[in-house]
Image (cartoon, helix red, strand yellow):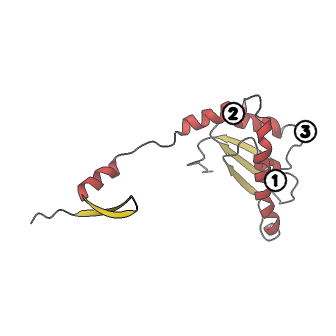
Amino acid sequence: GNTMAASAICLRRGGSLRSRVQPASASKQARHLSVQVFNRDLKAWQRGAAVNAPDFENYTYLKDEVASRLLERLDDIHESYSFADVVDLGAGTGHARRALTDRGLGIKHLLEIDSSEEVLKKSAADAAGDNPPDFEVVQLHMSEEVPDLAP
């Protein structure tokens, strides 16, 4: 015969649980529907607009502090590992680069990847400024969600 497969879904309403049965064909249809929750192009535009805002520097200290604290963890393991090549996905204006500079981790190359060209321009200007890094910095404008890191 013709049997219809079903999947049970539990819903919580008013403090009680109840079950509803849906045909398997409905769940197959739901898998083919897609909703764009996150617009990467819009986010890249927003990052570029933010970096050009007049008060942008008022807020960079927080990201610099987070990067510094995160990279302090490398101090605990750097004697047993070598970090000659480093990739910074979502590099922003160079928060990790600034935290890595003069740390003595043996870094030779840093690849900064960001989805916003404006942000990378700001990072490049900063890297060429008063406190340049002690390693080579290369910047790539691409999606950090699926970066193309092939040599």
Q: Can you tell which of label 3 and label 2 is closer to the viewer? A: 2
Q: Is residue 147 left or right of residue 66?
A: left
> How many angstroms separate mark 3 from mark 2 (CA)?
23 Å
Question: What residue would you read off at disc 2?
Answer: 50
- Would you place residue 98 above or below residue 85 in this image? above
Name the residue at 88% across, 53% down: 102
Q: Is residue 77 left or right of residue 46?
A: right
Asked if labels 3 and 1 touch by Cβ distance under 8 angstroms, the answer is no
Q: Residues within 10 Å of mark 3 (few under 14, many from 20)?
A: few
Name the residue at 83% across, 69% down: 79
Q: Is residue 6 left or right of residue 132?
A: left
Instruction: Tell me which corner region of the image, top left, top right, bottom left or bottom right, holds residue 10.
Output: bottom left
Q: Nearer the viewer, residue 138 or 96?
A: 96
Give the secondary structure at mark 2: helix
- Would you place residue 42 above or below residue 2 in this image? above
- Hey, what amino acid is under mark 1? Leu
Q: Can you tell which of label 1 and label 2 is closer to the viewer? A: 2
Give the secondary structure at mark 3: loop
Name the residue at 26% across, 53% down: 26
Furthest residue in direction right, as rendered: 130
Residue 77: percent from left, percent from top: 79, 68
Q: Nearer the viewer, residue 38 or 125?
A: 38
Locate the N terminus and report the quarter of the image it occupies: bottom left
Question: What residue would you read off at disc 3?
Answer: 130
> How many angstroms separate mark 1 from mark 3 (CA)?
15 Å
Residue 58: percent from left, percent from top: 80, 37
Give the secondary structure at mark 1: helix
> How many angstroms separate mark 1 from mark 2 (CA)?
24 Å
User: Which disc number belongs to residue 92?
Assistant: none
Question: What residue would you read off at disc 1?
Answer: 100
Q: Counting residues from the N terminus, which is met first, the one under dot 1 or under dot 3?
A: 1
Q: Nearer the viewer, residue 41 or 87?
A: 41
